[in-house]
Image (spheres, grey):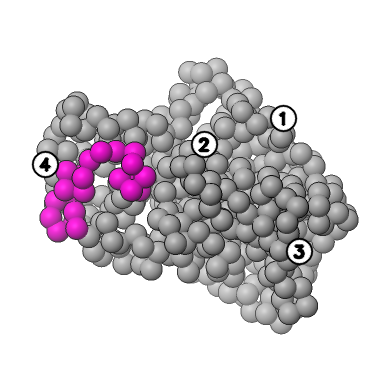
Amino acid sequence: MKRSWITRTIFLFTVLFSFNACDLQNENGQVPVTENKYLISYKLDNSYPKAVIDLLFSQLGSNVPEATAIRSKVNYSINVYKVTYKTTFQKQDKVASGLVCIPIGSGPFPLLSFQNGTNTLNANAPSVNPGYELYQLIEAVASTGFVVIIPDYLGFGSSSQMFHPYLHKESTVQSVTDLLRAVKEMFANHLKDIKISKDLYLMGYSQGGWATLALQKEIETKHAQDFTLKASACGAGPYNLTEMTSYVLLQQQYPMPAFLGYMMNSFIKAGETSLSYGAIFNRPYDTRVPVLYDGTKSIDEINAQLTANVNELFTIDLRNNFSSAASYASLRTALQNNSVEAWATTTPTLLLHGNKDLYVPFMISTYTYQKFLDAGAANRVTFVPLPELDHNGAIVPSGLASIKWFLDLKQ
């Protein structure tokens, strides 16, 4: 699906923003803090005027009807902050980062955490490139009365010196939850004139859809005393990594080899599997994968160094014996441990997926939805297929539909 109308709309927003926004970085530099357990520092990056945000959703409304409904809820100008905070990875202390977008008002405002999709470039992490068109769209949602939080993920922004643990559930949930805690400290100890509520909304797409569902389950089952989960919207996530991998290994062509290379590289470096690169990938890809995901290469550049031919990319032994051979037991365990199994959720949950998706197959969401039904969550989980949309084409429609759903629930 062509995204030219999206690009034109966001470009217009960016141009208008450059004339109207207030660059306050010189006046308000980075603010270090010492009295917090999680928050390290925050810095005002920019401000978005309400009138420009209103125009953004007006322009989007001509192509995506949900944007018109969102526009009617635009009530605030917003400030966008870059934050750093403390978290851990495999019991080691890390400094992570992200964005916090705040309505200019008194509140109280609920929190909305957005988990972004697969990214391989440190230069395109949210806190490094907050002006990226899709991040700007999410930032603008704060104008409807949410404090919008956008994590960088480990391996990006302030933690770019380490590898990104892609689709590694424990560290993803830990780092995002710690950012939520840091944001609560930011308001409780520093931005005391603005009130936030305990209400929390979650949304994400692709890797972010998977991260959102994992975060929802963790908060709902272990941290309900800290946050009141109001709703969760997950778009096109690879929730069941075993089913996802099995699907790819059965194909002749898979047009996004960067996804599988990213996951395998992550699991090997995180110690999730004892397999070597050579046990998974044929030459020369077994030597390419370990160096491709260093934060300097785009997904397109990585795809160009791999191959869409599944038989050429993966070893014949893996393709033939992945599901049963003892030699692949550690990989099967890693995939199972980092999948998000359905449960009897008590949170209103929206699953969205384009039915022409060739990157994360549509059947992953249908499978997950059925598992939710089997777990007794039929009255809490809604599945919305997005007709005729592929993986990239569904990004904005999925996001806008999620935001509209949140606003309807919030009202």
Crowding at label 2, few (<14), some or many (≥20) Cα neighbours within 10 Å? Answer: many
- Residue depth check, mark 1 versus mark 4: number of the one nearer the observer: 1
Q: Which amino acid does label 1 sit on?
A: Gln
What residue is pinned by disc 3?
Answer: 78
- Distance between the alpha carbons at the discs numbered 1 and 4: 49 Å
**Secondary structure beneath disc 1?**
loop
**Secondary structure beneath disc 2?**
helix
Q: Nearer the viewer, residue 41 or 366?
A: 41
Kindly identify the residue that appears in the image at 34 percent across and 39 percent down: 272
Going from N to C along the chain, the mark reached first, 3 or 4, is 3
Q: Nearer the viewer, residue 38 or 149?
A: 38
Whether tag 3 and tag 4 are in contact, CB under 8 A, the answer is no
- Residue depth check, mark 2 versus mark 1: number of the one nearer the observer: 1
Instruction: Specify the quadrant of the image occupied by residue 16.
Output: bottom right
Q: Nearer the viewer, residue 228 or 379?
A: 228
Q: Residue 214 carries which label?
A: 2
- Distance between the alpha carbons at the discs numbered 2 and 1: 18 Å
Q: Which of 194 and 247 is in front in this view?
A: 194
- Distance between the alpha carbons at the discs numbered 3 and 1: 29 Å
Kindly identify the residue that appears in the image at 12 percent across and 38 percent down: 317
Quadrant for the N terminus, please.
bottom left
Kindly identify the residue that appears in the image at 47 percent across and 62 percent down: 160
The residues colored magenta run: 266-287
Q: Position of residue 77 (x, y in %)?
A: 79, 65
What residue is pinned by disc 4?
Answer: 316
Q: In this view, does 64 lie to the left or right of 319?
A: right
- Distance between the alpha carbons at the discs numbered 3 and 4: 54 Å
Q: Position of residue 239 (x, y in %)?
A: 43, 36
Q: Which mark is residue 225?
A: 1
Residue 18 seen by the camera:
yes
